[in-house]
Amino acid sequence: MAKAKVKAKSGLGTLNKILFIILIILLIATVVIVIVSPAKVPVKEEVQGEFEDVAVIDEFTPGTYGGVEFASVDDVVNYYVECFNYNKTLTAPYTDNGEKKNYYKLLGDEKLNVTELLIEGKSNATINSLVPGIMGGLFSGHAKGLPPAAEADPLTDFRDDGTIPQQESHLLPEDVLACNVVDNGDGTITITIQPKYAILSMADQDSQGRFFNVLGDITGTVAQISVLSFSTGDANDNVKVRYAGGTGTITVDTASKEITAADYVMKVHLDVTHANVTVIKDKSATMELEYTNHFPASDEWLAETGVTRG
């Protein structure tokens, strides 16, 4: 597909915006926890190589599902890529804030949730009560095609300032830690895929970046936060992002290869160490995040973003 010279909607870029929101939450939380409990608690920093990537889904069993034979994990991944690519050729009419558009037929929502937030190794009820309000005020999703995706419009579905096309999947069998297939008995099958973990995942460059809407390079975003510095080292030394344990669950009509439903749950572990925030010095924080895309997005959710079908 030829690359169109059309500017995408998301000024800063949705994924950098997500990271910016995450860091703002961490900074606000750090200030709050210091006010509530100023005593510093030693935090054990993760040793490189200590993390073990484990499957969180059932093991694949070779067989015929919905009339399709799967002899190996490679077969499952290749079939998923084939279905993904076909579905990203399908479009439908939409109205976006009064303007007629031709978007992907299958559009999904996007949501970002903080599932755990620790400052100096401890949880705090005051911080936890603040997070939903901060998230709601700073992050609002918009409709997207199947991930990885930047937009709902095939013409603007490019990551990294238009350099990485997302109209086709680039997922490889070697990117997958585990997968399985279920025959639903109604002409559809459900494929579940868990990609291998990645550190500081980059769009289209690793196992997570070829499956999810990952955060990408965080250096520029961190640099934009003028009140943040580090007691030792720089952002590369003190801001660590690990992707692991996320899955995609995709239902396919095997007669047409059309994807009828899908849920992508990307899980992210973020560490910030030796952070200075104005007068607050040398603090550490960890956060667990879930970024989800559900397909198809409901009419109600789309309407909240200004989009209607037809």
Image (cartoon, rainbow, N blue to C red):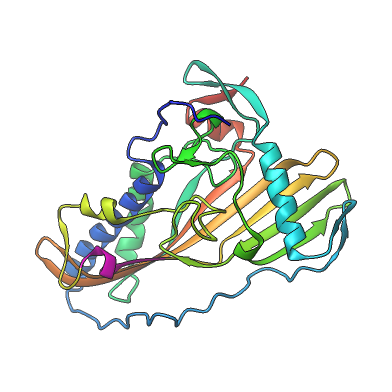
Quadrant of the rendering where the C terminus is positioned: top right
How many numbered marks, from 0 up? 0
> Which residue shows up at 43% across the image and 26% down it?
5
Toward the viewer: 27 or 37?
27
Q: Would residue 106 appear left or right of 76 to someone viewing this image?
A: left
The image quarter containing residue 200 is bottom left
**Residue 306: image location, x then y, percent:** 48, 26
Res 277 quadrant in image = bottom left
Q: Looking at the image, which residue is at 67% across and 54% down?
A: 249
Q: Is residue 300 above or below residue 47?
A: above
What residue is drawn where x is 36% and y is 61%?
A: 128
Outermost residue, left direction? 279
- Residue placed at 73% from the left, 41% from the top? 260
Which stretch appears magenta?
234-241
Q: Name the one closer to the observer, 237 or 299.
A: 237
**Left or right, 135 with reference to 104:** left
Residue 288 vertical position relative to residue 252 in the rendered view, above or below: below
Q: Position of residue 83 (x, y in %)?
A: 72, 44
Q: Position of residue 294 (x, y in %)?
A: 60, 45
Q: Is residue 54 above or below residue 88?
A: below
Residue 236 is inside the magenta segment: yes
Q: Quadrant of the N terminus?
A: top right
